[in-house]
Amino acid sequence: MNRHTAKIIFQIVFYVALASVVIYIMGNGLGLVKGLDFGAGAYYYADIPQFGKYVNGSHFHTQFPMWFHIALFLVWGGAMYKFWIWMDKKLK
């Protein structure tokens, strides 16, 4: 088996496994907030009305301010974007 064929087989197995995990997670409702039914948009937490009350309430305790968490999220997103661009160039 040559390298190209092995790569194609790996990709097929990977995507079938990924699809299986996604279907399992969505089929069992893992990660959803009970009592909030948003249909297909249920996994997009920005669609939840009054989302702030879920993260700014007294149940969310941290020694860092909320702006720090938002900044960390944006930095992480920027780093992942740069990583994907780098990977795209490497794989071409």
Image (cartoon, rainbow, N blue to C red):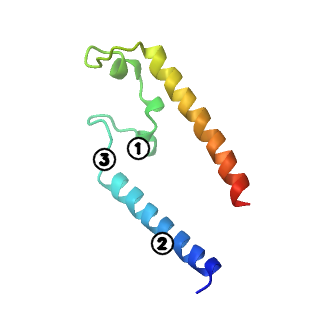
In the picture, measured across the screen, residue 78 lies left or right of residue 39, that is right
Q: Quadrant of the C terminus?
A: bottom right
In the picture, measured across the screen, residue 13 lies left or right of residue 53, that is right
Which quadrant would residue 65 be assigned to in this image? top left
Which quadrant would residue 52 be assigned to in this image? top left
- Which amino acid is tagged 2? Val
In the picture, measured across the screen, residue 14 lies left or right of residue 52, that is right
- Camera-side residue: 79 or 42? 79
Gap between marks 3 and 2 measured at Cα: 23 Å
Viewer-nearest of discs 1 and 2? 2
- Above or below, 3 against 36 in this view is below
Q: Position of residue 36 (x, y in %)?
A: 32, 34
Residue hosting label 2 = 13
Q: Position of residue 83 (x, y in %)?
A: 62, 44
Q: Position of residue 51 (x, y in %)?
A: 40, 23
Residue hosting label 1 = 39
Q: Residues within 10 Å of mark 2 (few under 14, many from 20)?
A: few
- Which amino acid is tagged 1? Gly
Identify the mark nearer the N-term, 3 or 2.
2
SS for dot 2: helix
Please tell me which residue is depicted at 39% across the width and 14% down the height of the picture.
64
Please tell me which residue is depicted at 59% across the width and 75% down the height of the picture.
8
Viewer-nearest of discs 3 and 1? 3
- Above or below, 14 against 61 in this view is below
**Can you see residue 50?**
no
Q: Quadrant of the N terminus?
A: bottom right
Residue hosting label 3 = 30
- Which amino acid is tagged 3? Leu
Tags 1 and 2 touching, CB below 8 Å: no
Please tell me which residue is depicted at 46% across the width and 41% down the height of the picture.
41
SS for dot 3: loop
Residue 22: mark in rendering: none
